């Protein structure tokens, strides 16, 4: 249950510009020239989307299928008959459920701006305007952090905390059973990076209109560009793993429920009002100008949000340690 959903998700994300294809043939089968059977006629004229399944439900399918991995992780920890594995499974379940809420809410502004949940339509809308990382920066920030937590990457790898739980929910597994967990985990890392690339960095889009002409060269170049973008975000996840220490579990839950979820809800209302004001009050209909106006709104809001996060109001060090230090400072003059 943990392994099967992971490879399915990459099949619905477009990885290159549509390829112009023109063919018309019939497939026939016969046994030594006898009993010929027509297996069907295959016809395609025009552009073929470079995606295994171009689903109209788009990122809703990805969110729905990726949530099934929680069951595999929880059942793996419970069925191990080990307290450490059980705690790892419980941690993983709580963490993934908590950050799925923030991840889903962070994608609603994408729906508000594009008017569609299909990946192809979202890429086309970014081609007409700006990449969504600019007009929807806080959605990108929330989605990226939730992606780290969903894939159990540092600094959110609490389900596999080696110093506390040996190896987490897969402690009692070895050989291919162990490898299935990590194949699924790293497949989910690739999926999250492809989602970030598609939803906020134009997908296979290259700045300019050259890639919209249609052709074999355009398909190859845009496919290579998509590959580079995904590899950059995979490197970014590795970079964070080398750089940041692990969160405490209370900090992890506080970030998900006290920061990201209220931030995503407030941002949905802000973007809805901003889009209405830009389109109906000010009257800006040009996609690029409207996205630039939203980018200005995001600059102001982002400055306020990151200022609050940096103040330590929501996620901070141990309260007991700080209180003990303050008590020690208060007793110091008396002792002297």
Image (cartoon, rainbow, N blue to C red):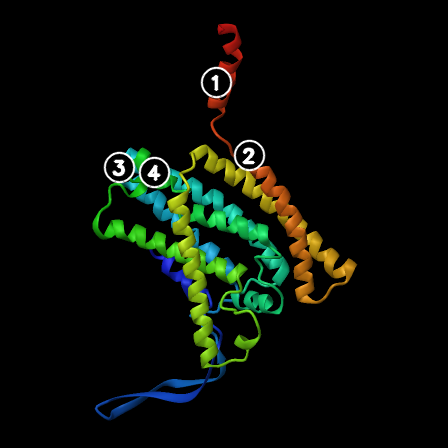
Q: Is residue 136 visible?
A: yes
User: Residue at the front extreme?
Assistant: 336
Q: Which mark is residue 161?
A: 4
Asked if the residue at tag 1 contacts the one at tag 2, i.e. Cβ–Cβ closer than 8 Å, the answer is no
Q: Which image quadrant is residue 286 in?
A: bottom right
Q: Nearer the viewer, residue 321 or 76?
A: 321
Give the mark nearest the N terminus, 2 or 1: 2
From the top left corner, tell me how far across and down residue 227 is, in percent. Answer: 42, 65
Residue appearing at x 46%, y 65% in the figure: 13
Give the mark nearest the N terminus, 1 or 3: 3
Q: CA distance from mark 3 to mark 2?
A: 36 Å
Asked if the residue at tag 4 contacts the one at tag 1, i.e. Cβ–Cβ closer than 8 Å, the answer is no
Q: CA distance from mark 1 to mark 4?
A: 27 Å
Instruction: State left or right for residue 233 relative to residue 290.
Output: left
Q: Secondary structure at mark 3?
A: loop
Give the mark nearest the N terminus, 4 or 3: 3
From the top left corner, tell me how far across and down residue 83 is, in percent. Answer: 29, 33
Q: Which image quadrant is residue 37 in?
A: bottom left
User: Vertical placement of 5 versus 42: above or below?
Assistant: above
Q: CA distance from mark 2 to mark 1?
A: 20 Å
Instruction: State left or right for residue 146 relative to residue 208.
Output: left
Residue beneath label 1, please?
A: 324
From the top left corner, tell me how far across and down residue 107 is, in percent. Answer: 56, 54
Residue beneath label 2, please?
A: 314
Q: Secondary structure at mark 1?
A: helix
Q: Nearer the viewer, mark 3 or mark 2?
A: 2
Residue beneath label 3, please?
A: 81
Q: Nearer the viewer, mark 1 or mark 4?
A: 1
Q: Nearer the viewer, mark 1 or mark 3?
A: 1
User: Vertical placement of 294 versus 305: above or below?
Assistant: below
Q: Nearer the viewer, residue 25 or 246?
A: 246
């Amino acid at each position: 249950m943990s392994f099967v959903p992971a490879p399915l998700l990459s099949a619905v994300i477009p990885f290159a510009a549509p390829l112009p294809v023109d063919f018309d043939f019939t497939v026939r089968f016969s046994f030594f020239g006898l009993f010929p059977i027509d297996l069907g006629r295959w016809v395609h004229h025009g552009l073929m989307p470079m995606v295994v399944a171009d689903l109209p439900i788009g990122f809703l399918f990805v969110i729905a299928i990726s949530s099934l991995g929680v069951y595999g992780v929880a059942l793996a920890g419970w069925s191990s008959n080990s307290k450490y594995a059980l705690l790892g499974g419980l941690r993983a379940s709580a963490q993934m459920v908590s950050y799925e809420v923030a991840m889903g809410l962070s994608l609603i502004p994408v729906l508000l701006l594009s008017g569609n949940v299909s990946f192809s339509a979202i890429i086309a809308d970014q081609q007409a305007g700006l990449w969504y990382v600019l007009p929807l920066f806080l959605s990108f920030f929330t989605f990226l952090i939730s992606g780290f937590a969903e894939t159990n990457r540092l600094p959110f790898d609490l389900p596999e905390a080696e110093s506390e739980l040996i190896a987490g929910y897969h402690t009692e597994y070895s050989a291919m059973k162990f490898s299935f967990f990590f194949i699924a985990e790293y497949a989910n890392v690739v999926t999250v990076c492809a989602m970030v690339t598609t939803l906020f960095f134009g997908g296979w889009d290259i700045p300019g209109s050259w890639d919209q002409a249609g052709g074999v060269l355009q398909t190859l170049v845009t496919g290579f560009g998509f590959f580079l973008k995904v590899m950059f975000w995979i490197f970014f996840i590795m970079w964070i793993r080398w750089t940041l220490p692990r969160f405490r579990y209370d900090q992890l839950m506080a970030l998900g429920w006290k920061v990201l979820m209220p931030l995503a809800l407030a941002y949905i209302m802000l973007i809805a009002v901003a889009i209405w004001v830009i389109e109906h009050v000010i009257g800006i209909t040009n996609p690029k100008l409207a996205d630039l106006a939203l980018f200005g709104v995001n600059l102001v809001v982002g400055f306020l949000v990151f200022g609050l996060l940096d103040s330590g109001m929501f996620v901070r060090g141990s309260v007991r340690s700080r209180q003990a230090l303050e008590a020690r400072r208060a007793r110091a003059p008396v002792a002297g």
